[in-house]
Structure formats: structure tokens, C-alpha cells
Amino acid sequence: MADASLNAAAAPFGSIDALVQGLADCGYLADRRLATAVYLALRLQRPLLLEGEPGVGKTELAKALAAALRRELLRLQCYDGLEQREALYEWNYAAQLLHMRAAKARGSVEDIEAEVHQPRYLIRRPLLQALQAPPPGAVLLIDEVDRADEPFEAFLLEYLGEYQVSIPELGTVRAAVPPVTILTSNRTRELHDAVKRRCLYHWLDYPARERELAIVRARVPDAGAALSAQVADFVQRLRGQPFANAFQRAPGIAESVEWARALVALDTVSLDPEVVVDTAGILFKQRDDVAALNAQLATELLAPADGA
């Protein structure tokens, strides 16, 4: 692809630092490794596959990137049994039938199949919308691709590799402006190597303490400095050893932020075991995990670390 087109794709961000700032301006605090992966995806015009635990900010990145690029965000939410017609297109059969009836009424039935297979009868789904988006183009989020089945992965290969799709009645549709494409996966199953080869890859992990604290402060400005620090410290210890073994799944960034908002709504100044137990259903979404966060464990988690 020509250098001019490469530069155009990353035009809003002349450097990784500029991208970091652009995302921060849209409320997303990215570390250097993640920002590098996004920057390269823009410059090389390649899809970016983000894998990681639920709640680490994969979907939010796509939203912030669309805002930073001033592009429309198109979202394809994947699930078991997702069909091509729900992702790409389907024909407006009711309108086609009316057209056919009108053609027969006026005695014009020659080449009726070509008449009813016109773009105006096409119902565009996210993939086709992304390919046909006008400048500056779109950001396409293919969310939780691991929830779809393997045949759907195979269907995606043409789009991911060449930014085009084939419609039997109309031919090949190619992108005038390559969409910025973000795929996310929670690794409920392993994706096929053919999908991974067509994408740049980044594993998105839980944030370090300082970045999580910065996120909580940015998203919940009403929380005091002391409470924000307690939230970040508490969640960090929940995810670490030996406490992580007590839970099925550690809280993500989304839960940290939501917990901070709930604590502000309760006029909480500082954490104590009682408020932790009472609000455990915000940090965890499994009954056993909520039960595991009892007063004794909350007290241990709130105790100062050795040497602190």
C-alpha cells in the first residue's frame, strides 16, 4: 500500500505519544505497549486483535479510538450461532416482492432477478457498513469474536485480509477507506491461527496500580484522593496472591470504576469491612465470589501490607 495512504490512516496521530494523548483526551488511559500496538495498526492498516480477561478495557479502547479519530463506531457483537447475514448483509425481501409484483403488473418481467438484486434493496449490516463508510471511514469493533463459531471465523478471513467481501449477486465490495478494525476476545476458546495471522496482536492485562488509580480518578472525579487510592489498592490486592485463589474471576477495571461510583453514592469517605461486604456485588458477579468476600477476608485485604 502506498506511503501516502499509510500516512493518511494515522494522520491524526503523528507519534505514539500523540496517540496516548488523543486517547486520554477521550477518557482512555493507555500504557505505552498498548498505544504502540494501536499506532502500528493504524499505520499498517491492519486489524488489531485484543485478548484479555473481561473488564480490562478492550471494548472501551475501540470506543475511545473512534472518538479520538472522529470516526463512526460500528459494533458487531458476536455470539454463538451468529450468521453471515447478521454480520454482512441481507436482502429486503418484502421490498423485492413488491417490486416483482409491480413488474408483473406492468408486464415487465425481463431480467427481473437483476432488477430486484440492486443495492437499494440491500440491508447493510456492520461489516458492509464499515466497508462502505464515507471518508474518514469507520472504526469497526468485532466484539467477543471468541463467542462466535469456527465457520464464522472462516467467513471473516476475506474481510480481515483484504478489507473486502463477496456478495454473490453484486460481486466484490472493496473498502474505499480501510476501516480501523478492532477484534476482542475473552479467550473462552482459542481462535484459529488464520484469524490471528491477519491481525496485529496485543494481550491486554490488568493495569498496574498507578494506572488503575489514574483511571479511577479520571472516571470518578467525585471520589476523594484517599478513597480512590483505597479502591485501587484493594482491587490490586484482590487480584494478587494469595487472595486471588479465593475467587473465580478477579474484578476488571470496569468493576473498579463502578465500585468507586457506588462508594461515592453511599457517601463513603474511607473503606471498612462492612461497606466492602455490603458492596461486594459490584466487584463480583458470581454468587460464590460475593460470599467469599466476607468480613474476615475484607479485614485482611484492608490491612496495611507488610512494610507499609
Image (cartoon, rainbow, N blue to C red):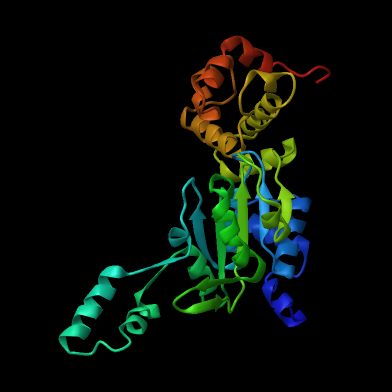
In the image, taking residue 98 as reference, residue 2 lies left or right, namely right
Q: Position of residue 27 (x, y in %)?
A: 60, 52
**Rendered-image quadrant of the C terminus:** top right
- The residue lying at 43 percent from left, 66 percent from top is 89
Q: Nearer the viewer, residue 264 or 73?
A: 73
Against 26, is 308 above or below? above
Q: Position of residue 218 (x, y in %)?
A: 61, 45
Q: How many marks?
A: 0
Q: Position of residue 214 (x, y in %)?
A: 68, 42
- The residue lying at 51 percent from left, 65 percent from top is 127
- The residue lying at 52 percent from left, 62 percent from top is 73
**Rendered-image quadrant of the N terminus:** bottom right
Against 287, is 130 above or below? below
Is residue 275 visible to us here? no
Is residue 135 visible to us here? yes
In the picture as drawn, the residue positioned furthest to the left comes out as 105
Image quadrant where residue 196 sits: bottom right
